[in-house]
Amino acid sequence: MQLLHYSPTPYPPILSAPPRRRGFLCSSVPNVARGGGASTPAAAPRGAPVSALAANCVVLGCGLVTLDYLATVDAYPRPDDKIRSGELQISGGGNAGNALTGAARLGLNTRLISKVASDEIGGTVLLELQEAGIDVSHVIIADGGNTTFVYVIIDKKTKTRTCIITAGSPPMVPNDLSMSNLSAALQDVNLLYLDGYSHEMALAVAKQADLMKIPILVDAEPERTKAELESLLGLASYIVCSGKFPEKWTSISCIPSALVEILVQYPHVRFMIATLGENGCMMLERSEGNSSEIDAADIENVAESLRLKVLKDDNLPTCVSSKFMGLSSRGHGTVTSTIFGRLLIGTAEKIPSPELVDTTGCGDAFIGAVLYGLSRDMSPEKMLPFACQVAAIKCRAIGARTGLPWQSDTRLSKYLC
């Protein structure tokens, strides 16, 4: 049995971004007043396109960091079984930590708000984040308590993983961060990412970011309750979720229709992406237009027509898109909802079974790539295959971060040129 501890590796310098072209992301307002009665300059609507973005884009993440204890097994144990593990690894985890590590490896400047305890685990977690190039100066270190840690069982037979989480104590709360420290954390930030953990703190950060016209990406996990997520989604510019979330949120079993319902419910959301594992992802992008004045197409029919266009023999990620049009959902009963936008389907890489090692952190890798894509003004047609490719590369190594690709990875060259 082999035990692998995290050990530092030489990290390449974080590269500056080229000047932005017109695209998704709305930059934060420069020189926002932090006192003294000065007024805040006018800014574009949340998530609106802008002509340029500062070359040194900063992404702030707020959420969970952990230490993961990962073990592979030949098959998941039955009740009362005793089995032997295969490979063991100890490394950093947590949604926010994983996504920001992925974004940092791709070249973004990243910053983190989170909380650890003053224990050995907390020290290990912070060291790994620092060496990934993440600014951890706004991470709260509790005096006493324990840092969140996770046992991860990786089933080599089914290619699935089971996570057993021991929550950190004390939890992160808004009073942990003064207004002056929060303002400092948000200074020069171009995009805020929230993983939904510590929802009271996340909401406090989101409200301040909203006042500063900073666009917000929310990771909507199905484990979060409506009470925890509703206010965050109301402030979101972009939503990324798993395929389970749309039905849980709307009680509509068809994902495309559920996406319409959610975008109608949250009019500030520019796009929503549902990740679908080996089936890739689906994105609904809103556009300007009055959906009440046009004949709308049934989004389920549109989705089916797009699926027929997908190249079945292509092993690498691809993307197909509808045109911008009115899209209606079947909703509940006879009630229909309509938005003006377009539907996109991204396919996943077909990974040979021997190469598929571990899906832990796959969704976080995808989000890290979306953060990069937004910050670098990628079109959706390019961003979705790029994010699927990054997630597929991660799956070829154990743990959430070991397999995350660097910006120099040749498998990403066609997306980053």
Image (spheres, rainbow, N blue to C red):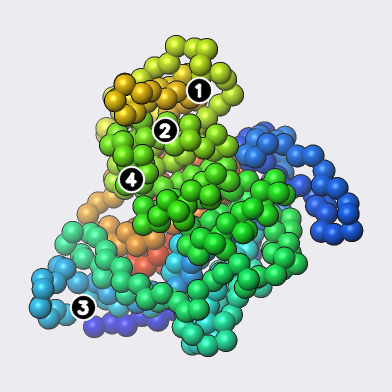
Q: Does label 4 or label 1 sit earlier along the sequence? A: 4
Tell which of 319 and 69 is nearer to you: 69
Q: Does label 3 or label 2 sit earlier along the sequence? A: 3
Tell which of 250 and 411 is nearer to you: 250
Q: Which residue is mark 1?
A: 340
Based on the displayed image, in which of its 4 quarters is residue 135 positioned? bottom right
Please tell me how crowded label 2 is: few (under 14), some (14-19), or many (20+) other residues with Cα within 10 Å.
Answer: many
Tell which of 296 and 170 is nearer to you: 170
- Check disc 3 and give the amino acid type: Ser
| Label 2 with label 1: CB-CB less than 8 Å | no
Q: In this rendering, which labeled residue sits more in front, label 3 or label 1?
A: 1
Q: In this rendering, which labeled residue sits more in front, label 3 or label 2?
A: 2
- Check disc 4 and give the amino acid type: Lys
- The dot on residue 69 is none
Based on the displayed image, in which of its 4 quarters is residue 50 positioned? top right
Q: Which residue is mark 3?
A: 85
Q: Does label 2 or label 1 sit earlier along the sequence? A: 2
Q: Is residue 334 above or below residue 139?
A: above
Badge 2 element: helix
Horizontal side of residue 385 vs 315, given as left or right: right
Number of labels in the image equals 4
Q: Which residue is mark 4?
A: 248
| Label 2 with label 4: CB-CB less than 8 Å | no
Badge 1 element: strand
Q: Is residue 268 above or below residue 39?
A: above
Q: CA distance from mark 3 to mark 2?
A: 45 Å
Q: Is residue 238 visible?
A: yes
Q: Does label 2 or label 4 sit earlier along the sequence? A: 4
**Residue 410 placement (x, y as % from top left):** 47, 51
Give the residue at x 52% y 37%. 266
Q: Is residue 381 visible?
A: no
